[in-house]
Amino acid sequence: MKPKAEAGEDRAPTGKAGASVSADCRITRLTEDELVAWGRRIGAAVTVPVFIGLIGPLGAGKSVLARAVARGAGVEGALPSPTFNILFRYPASGKAVVHADLFRIASAQELAAIGWEDMVADRGAIVLVEWCRRAGDELPRDRWEVTLDFVDDDARRVARVERVGEPSPLPGFRVSREDTK
């Protein structure tokens, strides 16, 4: 594993078995409220298993989106950031939600210590991983990558969604040509 220093690198690791990024790439602009609404739709409707890697600078909305997905899936109670604990697992309406933050992960040994292989192999879970590219080639072959970034002085953020391999469909992502300008 080669941990990545930057979350928003242009080239994504291919992951297990050499999966490549598909042409299924969508870009839109979202306010924080729209980001939360989209996350809730994902959590309520996505088919497990699904791995969603969350990419972007500090404060771009990775944790906001992860919490919204968890809420949409039926997770109740507090949803703290996994920045220091690295990993939280929540029961949710017949499935699990796993929320991990790899910002502090620096080696394959550290990934193994948090149960990475079991986490990405969990057939009954929505797996949400902030700073996912730090996993390098240990990323699962089939996944979604959501890159969030700021838009100048606008209250909106840009969300870029890419399918890698053949993950479960990601519901609720509305795109128009106007959104990409």
Image (cartoon, grey):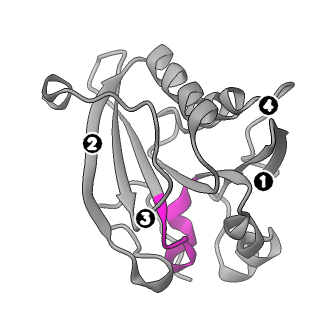
* Separation (CA) of disc 3 from disc 4: 26 Å
**Considering only order in the chain, which callout, 4 or 3, is on the residue closer to the N terminus?**
4
**In-image side of 31 versus 118 (left or right):** left
Residue toward you, 86 or 144:
144
Q: Which residue shows up at 46% across the image and 48% down it?
A: 169
User: Residue drawn 71% across and 53% down?
Assistant: 125
Residue depicted at 26% across the width and 25% down the height: 152
Task: Identify the element where label 2 is drawn.
Answer: strand
Image coordinates of residue 27 in percent, x first then y, are 26, 38
The residue lying at 64 percent from left, 52 percent from top is 48
Please say if 7 is above or below 117. Answer: above
The answer to whether 93 appears left or right of 134 in the picture is right
Q: Earlier in the sequence, mark 4 or mark 2?
A: 2
Q: Nearer the viewer, mark 3 or mark 4?
A: 3
- Does dot 1 land on a helix, a strand or a loop? strand
Residue 26: image tag: 2
Q: Which residues are magenta?
A: 130-143
As measured in the structure, the alpha-carbon distance from the residue carrying label 4 to the one carrying label 2 is: 27 Å
Amino acid identity at mark 3: Glu
Which kind of residue does numbered mark 2 sit on? Arg
In the rendered image, which residue does mark 4 sit on?
Answer: 75
What's the mark number on residue 73?
none
Residue 87, numbered circle: 1
Residue 181 as seen in the image, left or right of residue 75: left
**Image quadrant containing the C terminus:** top left
Query: What residue would you read off at disc 3?
Result: 166
Q: Do residues under tags 3 and 2 come within 8 Å of each other at their CB atoms?
A: no
